[in-house]
Each structure stands twice: as C-alpha cells, then as structure tokens.
Image (cartoon, coloured by chain):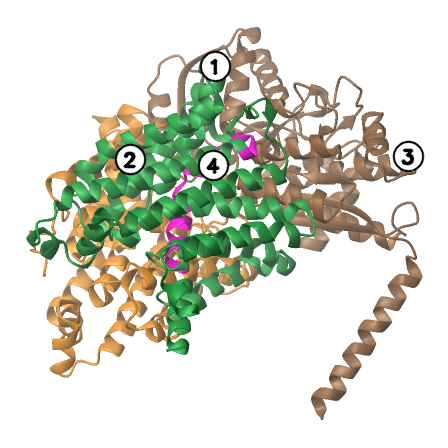
Amino acid sequence: MGTTVSRRWALRAVALAAFMTSAAFAADPVKIGSVVSATGPAAFLGDPEAKTLKLYVEELNKKGGLLGRPVELVLYDDGGDANKARTFATRLIEDDKVVAMVGGTTTGTTMAMIPVFEDAKIPFISLAGAIEIVEPMRAFVFKTPHTDKTACQKIFEDMKAKGITKIGMISGTDGFGKSMRNQCLKVIGEYGITVLADENYGATDSDMTPQLNKIKNTAGIQAVLNPGFGQGPAIVTRNYAQLGIALPLYESHGVASKSYVELAGPAAEGVRLPAPALLVVDKLPADDRQKAIGSAYKAAYEKATGQPVSTFGGYGFDGIQILTQAIARAKSTDPQKIRDAIEATKDYVGVTGIYTMSPTDHLGLGTDSFRMLQIKGGDWVMEAK
Amino acid sequence: MAEFLQLVFSGLTVGAVYALVALGFTLIYNASDVINFAQGDFVMIGGMGTVFLAAAGIALPLAALMAIVAAVIVGLLLHRLAIEPARGASPVALIMITIGASIFIKGVAQLVFDKQFHSLPAFSGDAPIALGGATLLPQSLWVMGVALALFVALYLFLEKTLLGKALRATAANRLAARLVGVNVTIILALAFGVSAAIGAIAGVVVTPITLTRYDVGTLFALKGFAAAMVGGMGHPLGAVVGGLLIGLLEAFGAGYISSTYKDAVAFVVILLVLFFLPRGLFGGRTVERV
Amino acid sequence: MLGRLLRARYATLFLLAAIMIAVPYLAPSAFYLRVAAVVWVFALAALGLTILMGYAGQVSLGHAGFLGLGGYAVAIGPARFGLDPVLCLFLGAALAGALAFLVGRPILRLKGYYLAIATLGFGVILALVFHSESDWTGGPDGMAVARVTVFGTRLAGAATWYWVTAGALLIGAFLALNIEASPTGRALKALHDSEVAAAGAGIDVGRKKLAAFVIGAIYAAFAGGLLAAMNGLITPDAASFMHSIELVAMVIIGGLGSVLGAVVGAAFLVVLPQALTVLQEYEQAVLGLLIMVFMIFLPAGIVPTLRKWLLERLS
C-alpha cells in the first residue's frame, strides 16, 4: 500500500518535472560532447575539467541555454585509455550525435580521437598540452591549453634574465613531462642554456632522491627544471629540500594548482613557475582584462567543488566558453558553421589567456599569457617584470 | 660514499613500504592460498582515511587509528562477503574476486574521498638528518621502524601464539587443521583482518613521504606482490627481504644505471633470482605434489 | 538435438558466426559496430591466453606486452621502414612468437604464482621500452599508425573494421578449437591437471608449455596489430600491467579453457563500461562489484556454468 502511493507520487513528480522542462525549453537540446580522463593516472587534470564542464553547462542552462535551446553535456570518462577514448568518440558522433566536442585530457587520448572527429567533420576543442595537436593544422581540431613549448620559452627567458646558463633537468616520464622535456630541449639552444644533467622519474615514483642526488653532484649546475605534473613534482620538491640543494628550482605549468603548494609544503618556498593569470587572479591589478572572468570562475568552481581552482579546469572553462560563444555567433548548430565560428574567435578574454584564432592558428595564445610566478609564504607571488 | 649512502637510504625507505605490503600478501596467502590484489587498497584506505578524518578535525593519532579500524572492517567484509561465499572456487577465481574488490574499493574511494593527491604532516618534522654526507628524513626512520616492529610482531604471533600456530597449520593443510579442531573460517577472517591492519598502518606511515590518492593501491599491490614472490611466497622474512631488495634495486638502478629503466633493472634482477631459485630467496625446494 | 549441438566441436564457431552476422542488423548505429569490433579484437587476444591458461594451466600476467608488440610492429614497420602494414601485422606476430620462444624457456620452468610474477616482470619491461624509446615508439603519448590499404581499398570506418576483426576472430577461434582437439591440446590439458603425471605419461612438458606460450603470444600480437591499425594509434598503455590483468580477467570471467568463454569475457569487460556510463561516478564501483558477484556465483566462468546448466536441463 505504502509503496504504491509513493510510487504514484514519484511518477507524478517525474511527469511534472518533464512537463516543466519541456515548457521552459521547447526545443531540442544542443548536444555538446566531452571525453575526459576523470579517473586514471591523469585524473589530476581530467577531474577538474569534468567538474568545470558540468558546472558551466548547469549555469548556462539556468541562464536560458544557447540559441533559446537547452544545452546537454554528454560526458564520458576514458580513464586515460586511448582505446576507450576512441570508442567514446565514436559513441559521441554516431550515437549521441553531438554537434561539437570539448575534451581530450591527455595528448594520447586526444590523438586517438582526432581522426574520428576529422572524418565526421565535427569540431573538437582539445584540453591537452602537446603542440602536435594543432601542428600540423587540422580543419576541425582546436585546443585551449598553452603548449609546453611556450612554457619552456617563458622559463628560459626568466633563466636568461637571471644569468643562468647551465641547468639540470629532472622530468616525469608521463606524457606531459616527456613532451615538455623534448620541447624544452628543442628551444633551449636559442637562449644559450645547456643541460648538464638530464634525469627522469616514473609518474608513480615515490622517491626521487637518487636522481636529484646525481644532479646535486654535477658540478656547474645553476638551476634545476622539473617538467611534470601530478604528485611527482611535489615529491621532487620535497626531496630537493631534503638533499639541501640550494639552487633555484623551476617547475612547469603542470603544477599550477594550489594542491602542489600544499603537497610540497615548506619545500615549495621559492619555487618558480610559469602559470596563467588564474592562479594570481586576486593579485591582478584592477584594470587587468582577465581579472573579472578569472575571479568569477575561481569563485564559482571553489564554491561548487570545495577544491582549489587549477589551470586544468581553466582549460576546460575556456574550451567550452569558446565553443558556446562560437555557437552563439554562428546562430546555428551546424558543425561546419561552428567550426568556422571557432576559427574566427577574436580577442576572447579567457581564464587561461587571451585567444585570437585564425585559419593558421588553432590555439591563438602567445607566451604573454604566461606569468612567471614564485611561491612565497605558501602562496603565489607575481614576479616583478 | 655519500652518494651510495643516499641511495641506500632511498632504497630502504621505499623498500620498507614494499615489505609491509608484501607481509600483507604473505599472511593471506598462508591462510588461504589466495593472492589478495586488494592488499594495496588497504594501504590507500589507511592513508586517505587518516587524511580525511584529520581534515574533519579529528586529532591525527585518533584519525589514524580510526582509518586502520576502517581498513580492518573492509578486510573482514571482503572475507565474509566475497571470499567466504566463494569457498571451494579455484585460486584464479578467488584472485579475480580480489581484483574486482580492488576496483570496487577504488570506485567507492573516489566517491567517499576525492581524486586529488593528499599528504599528511611528517610525524617528527621535516628537518633532514645528516648522516655520513647523506640525508635522511625522520619519517623514513618511522617507516623502517614500523616495518621492523610489524615484522617482529607478526613473527612472534605466527611462531609463539596458539592462534598463529593454528593459522600456520591451516596454511600447511586445511583439512588436517580442521580435523584437529581449528575453525578455518575464523582463521581466514583473522588473516584478512590482520593483513588489512598491516596495509593500513603502512598507509599511515608512508603517506607523509609518498603522498596518497584513491588509486595508489595498484602500484603498491604490484610492487608488494613482486617483493613477496622474490622473497619466496608465504615467508614473512622473505617478504621483508624481497621488499627491501626491490627498493634498493630501484634506488641503485636510478642512481647508477638509468632513471628511465630503474623498474626494468628491478625486474631483471627478479627474473634472474627466480631463474636460479625458482621458489624465491627463502622458498626452499618443495616438490610438487601429484 | 541441442545437447548434441552443445557437444559438437564447431558449434562454437557457428554460434559466433551467427552473432557476427546478426549484430550489424540489430545495431542502431555505427558506434555499436565499433564496440563489437573492440570485443572481437580483445577476444582474439584472450583466446591466446585461453590456450595458455585454460588448456595448459600456465598463468601470464604480462600478455599485454605481446599485444603492444604487435601494435608497435604495425606502427613502426610502415613509418620507419616503409613496409606494408598488412605484412607488419604478420611480422609482429612472428616477432612476438620468437620473443615468447626465447623468454619462454627459462620463464616456464617456474610454477604458479612464480610464473605469474616472471611474466608480469617481462610485461612491465616491454611496456617500459615502448614508453621510453621515444625515437622509435613516440613515447608515452603513443604513435600514429598509417591507414591500412588492402588491394587498393583503404580500411576505414567502423563497419569495415567490424568485418575485418570478426573474420580474424573467427579464424582464431577455428584454430583454437583445432588445437584443443589435437594431440597437443590433449597433452596440454593433461599437464594442466598434473605436470608430474603428464611427464610420467611421456609428455614433453617443457616443449608443450612453450608451444602454448608461443601460440598465446602470436594471438595477442595479432590482436594488438589489428587494434593499432583500427585505432590509427598505439600507446604504451596498451602493453600495461592493467591491460594484462584485464586479459586474464576476460578469460576467467568468461570461463577458463572455453573458446566461447574468451569471447564472452571480452564482451563483458568491453561492453560493461559502455553500459555503465549512465551511472557516471558510480561506474567503477559497480564494475568492481559486478566482477565480484559474477565470480562468486559463477566461479567456473559464465560459459562453462551456462553450458553445464543447459546440459543438465536437457538430460
């Protein structure tokens, strides 16, 4: 008896809810797809991305959706597995019939999905770092994160300004660390800097003192650079302090999250890294163009998730914002028109940087989108220019 | 010399962790012939549980204790709800159940906790101790000390107590143990509970060094399993020696050979050891029963 | 009638073929063909393990290493040496077989869990090589695989690959069934039950085990090559420890020693994550739970339990 009543009520509630949604949004939803690595080794990146995308679409629908239609986010977790990512990409296109996609947490999963989207002519905004995603150019593929090359350039500029010419490197062997290491080695010559020790560590290693000890015992090194993301750099930083290495330590944008500072603890004091304005949004001057959007995203994200904002979520934010703005400008959900509109993105002020895309540039960010930060007193401090 | 010493410190710290996981494997294997692939997840529960309980305002020692108790409950539930009902199944089926359990525990952990890395403050501060030109963190001493203490405790338990002898009897011959009045079900539950406790304690002491996340268990299980096997499955001393050996191999591999291939260095040595001693370092030469 | 069918050697083959023909008619979109193609590929790899684990009773926790080897052969051959991708598919399988032959001799002397850790170590080393030798393998982000052309037609699209992989699996299943019924298969089953007894019966245990290991490696490498060609990409992750575990799980969940079991097990672990996406964050927990439930209630695996049940009902 009790169950039948409650079931009837439940049915009524469902019917009512369905009626209300259909009244508010008479039209079909605009379907946006996403495949991110919300679990697995890259969850560090994928989790904030997934949360950001969900949050953004929720907010957007509260404000009335897009083109007068609700937006539906179809989100899948590939667990960092390229094969799964490819299957989900096929699913988004063949089964869910999405009009565009924002996702691809790692370079590996992105590269696995690119052919699927290129073949189907559906725009794909990737959230992964490597430069291969947009070089060579592909008609339907875009990306929002800085390339590791620009991060290297920013770091080497800073080193050069400080008169550093001989460095040691300790890189993660995950996709992020390895790709950045290779990019850094490509451009390092332009800055007159040489690498005297080139060490690696596995993404899940828990002690890097053997490698750092080698760097410590290499004569002539003036600074150390650590391309990597996840927990690796936090352990490198701690081991660095444990071994009492007094040289300046440079981290990458892969650690640009408050959790790195927390994990590394006092050892992070004095560490330098390139990072987008998002991390220091509170300290930006009032006239900085990124201040408003960065503060709003940070506040919304931290309120909804209870976790500190990270640049990775920011890539997701810029990705979906560029996409929805393009759909609004195109006044259409035709994938070809969306693609053209994304490519025409001009002077979009995002949390990561200011984007201007073109038929020859599907990223549209320069080195100036990075700020050189230093950790002081457990917080980020902007380096004086 | 200083460099050598530094590598030894590194290897012993990491190796002590592997040894603790391997001890957990050993205990359950001894009682049930099962390799429990959820062993690493007990380490995670110990670490993550303490982190989140401490964050909720509970004093660190109490939080650690509660996390260890939670892991023991998970271990007992694993035995009661998954291993016990499948009694009589082949070892591969039982191992598959523990793999399922490992996936399940990770799945629940990412809901109960989160997917970020976390750390705990070191028990005795972060000031490194200088020793012969090398440095050592006080927490490393904690890890090694706890590993040693747990090993001794486990040894005494297995050799000197009636319960421990019952456990060994069950391991040697389950039917015979049952005939002399050993309650095999309780013994198995005990093995799972104690293994979970060992894993969780390891998780608490290593989190300040290695950091923790909902999925760190996989790596611990992999290395702990390797340690238990190279030492000789079922031998507590073998587990400890195996763990330390792998830790040292990784450190020396990274320091002297190639940091990229340090895991390969460890596994090549394991393969060599098994080539000459097919039952591990302490496994002896048991003849297969027909 | 059904009882005879259940016992007939090639019944599995006909059932499999019937399913393969039916799926495209029932699939609402090409996505389902893609999932089915992935199932066929992993089933092929799992079949190799079925021969090793199910017939010969030898565990391998490094089988994904051979899968990766086959994949990288198809990636590296055409890109670095200008070889034909189809030729590389066979070269990769041959290479995996040769490697298995070399390492199999010392490794297969080990028993039980010791064999498990040795194969695991071997797999980890292979995965590490794929991961680290960037100049050859493209490093952690993997390597693109050139699109395959057969007789002037480019193999692209889910439907095409569906039939290619289905054909490969059918051939693989046919061979596996024949191996099972051959003297070698019977010898393998004998040593599965007891090595000592098998040796006593005059079976060259070492050689038979090695044969099973080599065959298993060839199956896995072939599957890996197909996977890489189908995806247009291979990453070192394909050779990872987790994938080795996944392959073993397929064999055990489906039913140790059963050809159809390998296919059912592969379907279980490939389709389930797709079906569970509606659960979002609960996906992993439910997947783990389902694996446990299936193993607790069907410890012999899905297919053998079902078969036994059917046979009992019929008699």
Q: Quadrant of the N terminus of chain A?
A: bottom right
The amino acid at mark 1 is Gly
The amino acid at mark 3 is Arg
Q: Which is closer to the viewer, label 2 or label 4? A: 2
Residue C82: which disc?
Answer: 1
Q: Nearer the viewer, residue A152 or C263?
A: C263
Q: Dot 2: what SS?
A: helix
Above or below, A159 against A52 in this view is above
Q: Which residues are magenta?
A: C230-253
**Residue occupied by mark 3:** A329
Residue B250: which disc?
Answer: 2
Above or below, C197 against A239 in this view is below
Residue found at x 49% / y 33%: C235
Q: Dot 2 falls on which chain?
A: B
Residue A267: which disc?
Answer: 4
Q: Which x, y percent locates residue A93?
A: 71, 42
Residue B168 magenta: no
Q: State how far apart marks 1 and 2 are (Cα).
A: 38 Å
Q: State how far apart marks 4 and 1 are (Cα).
A: 51 Å
Are the residues under marks 3 and 2 on the same chain?
no
The green-tinted chain is C
Q: Which is closer to the viewer, label 3 or label 4? A: 3
Q: Which x, y percent locates residue A227?
A: 51, 27
Q: State how far apart marks 2 and 4 are (Cα).
A: 24 Å
Task: Determine whether, in the image, residue B63 is placed left or right of residue A344.
Answer: left
Question: Visible in this render: residue A288?
Answer: no
Q: Dot 3: what SS?
A: helix
Are the residues under marks 1 and 3 on the same chain?
no
The brown-tinted chain is A
Find chain B in the image and tell me its colour: orange
Residue A16: which disc?
Answer: none
